[in-house]
Amino acid sequence: MAAMIDPAIGTLLAGAFALLFASAALHKARDLALFAQIVAAYGVLPGAAGLAWLVPLAEALVSAGLLLPVTRWAAAATGSGLLLLYAAAMALNLLRGRRELSCGCGGPNERRPIAAWMVWRNLFLAGTLRVVSLPWTDRPLQPVDLLTVAAGVAVTALIYMSADGLLARIAPRTLGREHLP
Amino acid sequence: MTGVLRDQAAVVGIGATEFAKDSGRSELRLALEAIRAALEDAGLALTEVDGLCTYAMDKNPEIEVFRHLGGRALKFFTRTEYGGGAACAPLLQAALAVHAGVAEVVVCYRAMNERSQYRFGQAFVPPPLANAESANWAWTVPFGLATPAAWVAMVARRYMHEYGATSEDFGRVSVACRRHAACNPHAWFYGKPITLAEHQASRWIVEPLHLLDCCQESDGAVALVVTSAARARHLRQKPALIRAAAQGAMDDQMNMTSFYRSDITALSEMRLVAEQLYASSGLSPRDIQTAVLYDHFSPFVLPQLEVFGFCGRGEAKDFIRDGGIEIGGHLPVNTHGGQLGEAYIHGLNGVAEAVRQVRGTSVNQVAGVHNVLVTAGTGVPTSGAILASAA
């Protein structure tokens, strides 16, 4: 029997990720020129900077898509793909020794160079987001579920921000392979 | 004919603290943090350090730094005069020591709480002694010409008069540096690019210098590790070879106030450095892919482009207007954001950026870098270097 999740848990996860992607999109859209410059600095794909505007657009669509049952599966797949893409871009540059690139994460006023823990974080998030794509049980949501979902999204966001902030201060920044010839 | 020092020594480690306005710790601690980071970057032990080089206005005595590092035998230490003008001098000193066999692992450092403990931009107070140094300042300071901005404004105004450069041309330097800083997470002005209109609207400090023509006052430290090129080949980082390094002072040289020369905009001491660098490296301007030009004040970037031969005399404004100093231009300049955008650590952060460009790890990496020019403070006896990748 395929794994299924409770709709309250599914909604909670979808809501939390929708918040994450909405925040990321807003942060990038506030200064698209700067974001394009950061994309160019990654040096992953030639000409990628010219298409940088697609990233916040995709993130906004993922955010909205996660909240609608009909688009949830596609949004979760796209969101996971974006997170894996970011992880790959960071890992590639860490292996190149380019540890000073901006991660572009952590909010508009956060200045963070890329680090290995961010790669693992993104892999974890991408995996967790896939859970949203699992079939949901057909239990109808009750009014009390709304409280569960709202409080759950808030707590998840707080835990995420705390863990993210803590890791930024204590986690090693290298993948441990940058110095190999 | 190339110099005997060419490619004999290399920068093998770089380290820095964060760049701040109030570090919250002593300058000694900042120096030690940067040195430890540089040695870790190089993969060398603290106990291997046997040389220390810094430059004037750093308040950390070499022996205190060495003692707190846990060093064992310090065989070589120098402290070059003239503040930011000496930013590249430690490279020359270290290369000389390494090549001569006087020392094997030389650390160059600069640490300052220049914003939180004292203010570099304030009016200068000469030493209260009747000596040659106070006599130098006696020609200007008692008459109100007492701040770095005011001294530089004299040169900038003359340069505008002679070559038709405008405040907007100076502003384009600031805009480029801030654009480069905007995606450098270590830069104070990370995420804060400016427009030319904002530059023009910023308040006057001393005409023709706007606020945004002036570098920051910063707290922070930077350190570099220099050793022989032969040893560098076996260390963990790609070495940045010291292809050339030079110091220079010229006729009628004064400290920031060389106003009695026949041509105060010619940067003759920097021209001397340029001549030495090109002669000893065997390189020409065409061989330089990117440069870190000392930008304590934006106007001084223009004559530096000229004395190093990237454009003709008086043509720097056109070079800059054409985007020559931008990423993708003929000579991307100050790819870390410079002292206008990253931090003012008296130029040593610029040397660190030159190393990153050679390694290929800069935030704003220029493609195909083989040789990087880095310069030191202008208006004072100065220095410069060319760092390079191995052939």
Image (cartoon, rainbow, N blue to C red):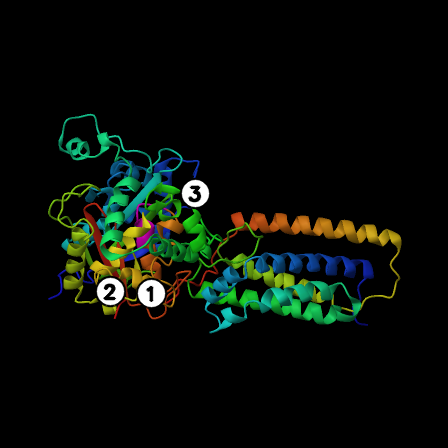
Q: CA distance from mark 3 to mark 1?
A: 30 Å
Of the two numbered discs 3 and 1 in the rendering, the one whose residue sits closer to the viewer: 1
Magenta stretch bounds? B344-351
Q: Which mark is residue A51?
A: none
The answer to whether marks 3 and 1 sit on the same chain is yes
* Residue type, numbered disc 3: Ala
Does the rendering let one see residue B56? yes
Q: Residue at x 54, y 71 (%)?
A: A51
Element assignment for label 1: loop
Give a yes or no on whether discs 3 and 2 share a subunit.
yes
Along the line of sight, the residue nearer the viewer: A147 or B272:
B272
Q: Position of residue B221 (x, y in %)?
A: 36, 44
Res B311 label: 2
Task: Name the secondary structure under disc 3.
Answer: loop
Using the image, name the chain to which the residue with label 3 belongs: B
In the displayed structure, B168 sits above or below B259; it is: below
User: Could you tell me residue B214's position as x and y percent?
Assistant: 35, 46
Q: Between residues B204 and B63, which one lies in front from this camera angle?
A: B204
Residue at 17 percent across and 43 percent down: it is B259
Q: Is residue B125 above or below residue B172?
A: above
Mark on residue B20?
3
Q: Amino acid at mark 2?
A: Cys
Whether pointer 3 and pointer 2 mark residues with C-beta atoms closer than 8 Å, the reply is no
Is B346 covered by the magenta stretch? yes
Identify the chain of the residue marked 2, using the numbered disc in the image: B
Q: Is residue B198 left or right of residue B240?
A: right
Badges 2 and 1, same chain = yes
Tag 1 residue: B324
